[in-house]
Image (spheres, rainbow, N blue to C red):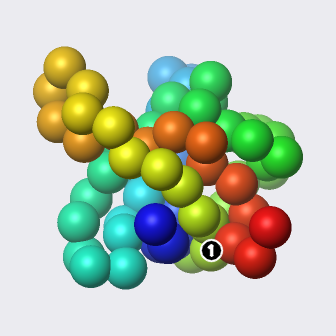
Amino acid sequence: MQGTIKRVIRDRGFGFIKSSDGQEIFFHRSGLQQLNFDGLKEGEAVEFEMERGDKGPRATNVRPSGT
């Protein structure tokens, strides 16, 4: 799936991605691949996989778009 970083909550170690279909998806810093959590910027294009988490959809294998 593709999307953009919508919000990063640095002190908590997670954030949200807005998918290309408009869905807001949670991600945790542990789900990042080839990305530095502290360097993430809102609006940055990413690709990811989605799984069902305890509280809804969760992004995994989050990586820069085009890799």
Vertical arrangement, residue 18 with respect to residue 51, above or below: below
Q: What is the x, y in percent for residue 31?
A: 59, 32
Q: Is residue 12 left or right of residue 18?
A: right
| Residue in the foreground of this view, choosing between 43 and 51 | 51
Q: Is residue 62 left or right of residue 22?
A: right
> Which image quarter is the C terminus in?
bottom right
Which residue is depicted at the point 61% across and 49% down? Answer: 62
| Residue in the foreground of this view, choosing between 18 and 63 | 63
Instruction: Give the number of marks.
Output: 1
Which picture quadrant has residue 17? bottom left
- Is residue 57 at least partly visible in the picture? yes
Vertical arrangement, residue 54 with respect to residue 22, above or below: above
Which picture quadrant has residue 10? top right
Q: What is the x, y in percent for residue 21?
A: 27, 79
- The kind of secondary structure element at disc 1 is strand
- Kindly give the residue lying farthest to the left in the view shown: 55
Q: What is the x, y in percent for residue 43?
A: 57, 75
Which residue is depicted at the point 33% across and 37% down? Answer: 51
- Is residue 44 at least partly visible in the picture? no
Which picture quadrant has residue 13? top right
Q: What is the x, y in percent for residue 48?
A: 54, 55
Which residue is depicted at the point 67% across and 38% down? Answer: 32
Which residue is depicted at the point 19% across and 20% down? Answer: 54
Q: Is residue 16 left or right of residue 32?
A: left
Residue identified by numbered label 1: 45
Vertical arrangement, residue 57 with respect to residue 17, above or below: above
